[in-house]
Amino acid sequence: MKRLQKALKGEKGFTLVELMIVIGIIIILASILIVQWRGARQRAYDSQALSVCRNAAVAAQIYYNDRLPQSYELMDEAALHDIEPSLPDAANKPPFDTYTVRPLGTDFQDFEVLVSHANGTLLYRATKDGIQSAKKGGPYPWGP
């Protein structure tokens, strides 16, 4: 026992200042990682909304090509869900806070699909000319 006490007498431990510096560095690194992780989740939500918007636009084109005379006149969420079952249907939209499908124009030769994830930051709009995005809450480049 005396030998152990003599061996430990010469040993020095960490000082309080050294421990506080290490803890401070760990806290700084953890805060950086938490912020990056939250941003990654937001991007994942927006990516899911973009994917649904693209799939809905493709389903709308299929709907148009299958109809004679070619028109988007009666197209809605249920019609696109029948073409592409992975799309949300009119009754079951979660996790999307916005998911609308409608024909555009007096001759119904264009369509609009609006999609945004409930936890995302972007609203996506698809027409036959392509997909646009904007921050939720506007102003939107395509109008009100």
Image (cartoon, helix red, strand yellow):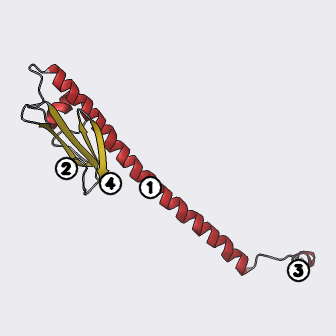
The amino acid type, in three-letter code, at marker 4 is Asn
Quarter occupied by the N terminus? bottom right
Residue 86 can be seen in this image: no
* Picture quadrant where residue 55 is located: top left
Q: Residues within 10 Å of mark 1 (few under 14, many from 20)?
A: few
Q: Which residue is mark 1?
A: 39
Q: Secondary structure at mark 1?
A: helix
Q: CA distance from mark 2 to mark 4?
A: 23 Å
Q: Residues within 10 Å of mark 3 (few under 14, many from 20)?
A: few
Asked if 68 appears above or below 112 in the picture, the reply is above
The amino acid type, in three-letter code, at marker 3 is Lys
Q: CA distance from mark 3 to mark 1?
A: 50 Å
> In this rendering, which labeled residue sits more in front, label 2 or label 3?
2
The amino acid type, in three-letter code, at marker 2 is Gly
Q: CA distance from mark 2 to mark 3?
A: 77 Å
* Residue that protrudes farthest toward the left in the picture: 106
At a point 24% along the width and 56% down the height, the residue shown is 139
Circle number at residue 143: 2
Q: Which residue is mark 3?
A: 9
Sequence-earlier tag: 2 or 4: 4
Sequence-earlier tag: 2 or 3: 3
Left or right of 6 in this view: 21: left
Percent of width and height locating residue 37: 48, 55
Q: Are marks 1 and 4 in contact (CB under 8 Å)?
A: no
> In this rendering, which labeled residue sits more in front, label 2 or label 1?
2
Q: Residues within 10 Å of mark 4 (few under 14, many from 20)?
A: some
Q: CA distance from mark 1 to mark 4?
A: 11 Å
Q: Are marks 4 and 3 in contact (CB under 8 Å)?
A: no
Sequence-earlier tag: 1 or 4: 1
Q: Which residue is mark 4?
A: 119
